[in-house]
Amino acid sequence: MSSALMGAGRFNDHLQKRLDPTIQIRPATEADIPQLSQIRLSVVENVLSDPERLTPAIYHDYLTGRGRGWLALCDGEAAGFAVADGQDASIWALFIDPRFEGKGLGKALLDRAVDWLFANGARVITLSTDTNTRAEGFYQAQGWQPGAIDVRGERHFTLSAPE
C-alpha cells in the first residue's frame, strides 16, 4: 500500500472519531446499489428528471471500475453515500437521505471521497450541482471554488490539492 493511501486511512480514522458513535461510514459495495439508488431517489433537491437513467449497471461501473464509493449508516440504516470518479477526478455523487440531514454525514462522506482522489494523484477535483440549492452553499462552505453554470443550469466547482 502506498504511503498516500496509508495516510488516507489514518485521515479517515480521524474523521470517524469525530462522528456520532451510532454513525458508521464504510466502503460501498455492489450489494449496496439498491440502497444507494433509494437514497438518491429520496432527495428533495437535485431531483432526477429521469430516475430510470441511473441503472444498477451505472452504479456498478462507478463503484468497481471508474472510482470508489462510501456508504454512511446510522444505527445500521443506510443514510447517505458519496462516489468519487477516479477517471475524471470528480465527485460523481453525494446524497443524504433527508431523514438523516444535519448529522455531518455530507461533510464526512465528501472528505473521504476527496481524500481518496487526492491520495490517488488528482491535483484538481471537480463536481457540479444545481444552482440555488443547499448543496451549492455546502460546497462553497467546504472550500470549493464556484465556476461557470452550464446549459443544464448546474454550477461547476473545483477543489485544488493542498500544497
Image (cartoon, rainbow, N blue to C red):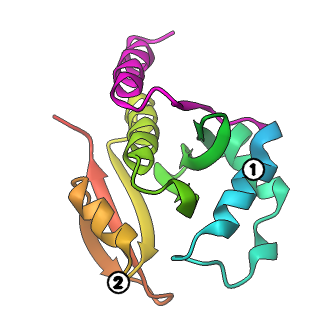
Position of 31 with respect to 107 (left or right) is: right
Q: Which residues are magenta?
A: 1-30
> Which secondary structure, mark 2?
loop
Q: Position of residue 108 (x, y in %)?
A: 40, 40
Q: Amino acid at mark 2?
A: Asn
Q: Which residue bears the numbered disc 2?
A: 132
> Which secondary structure, mark 1?
helix
Asked if residue 138 is among those painted magenta in the image, a careful observer would answer no
| Residue 131 in view, yes or no | yes
Q: Quadrant of residue 115?
A: top left
Residue drawn at x 43%, y 69% is: 128
Residue drawn at x 36%, y 28% is: 15
Q: Which label belongs to residue 35?
A: 1
Compared with residue 121, is residue 96 higher up or lower down, i.e. above or below? below
Compared with residue 107, is residue 133 higher up or lower down, i.e. above or below? below
Compared with residue 33, is residue 151 higher up or lower down, i.e. above or below? below
- Given residues 70 and 66, the one toward you in this image is 70
The span from disc 1 to disc 2 (Cα, nearest Å) is 27 Å
Q: Amino acid at mark 1?
A: Gln
Q: Quadrant of residue 116?
A: top left
Q: Position of residue 154 (x, y in %)?
A: 44, 80
Q: Which label belongs to residue 119?
A: none
- Given residues 153 and 29, the one toward you in this image is 29
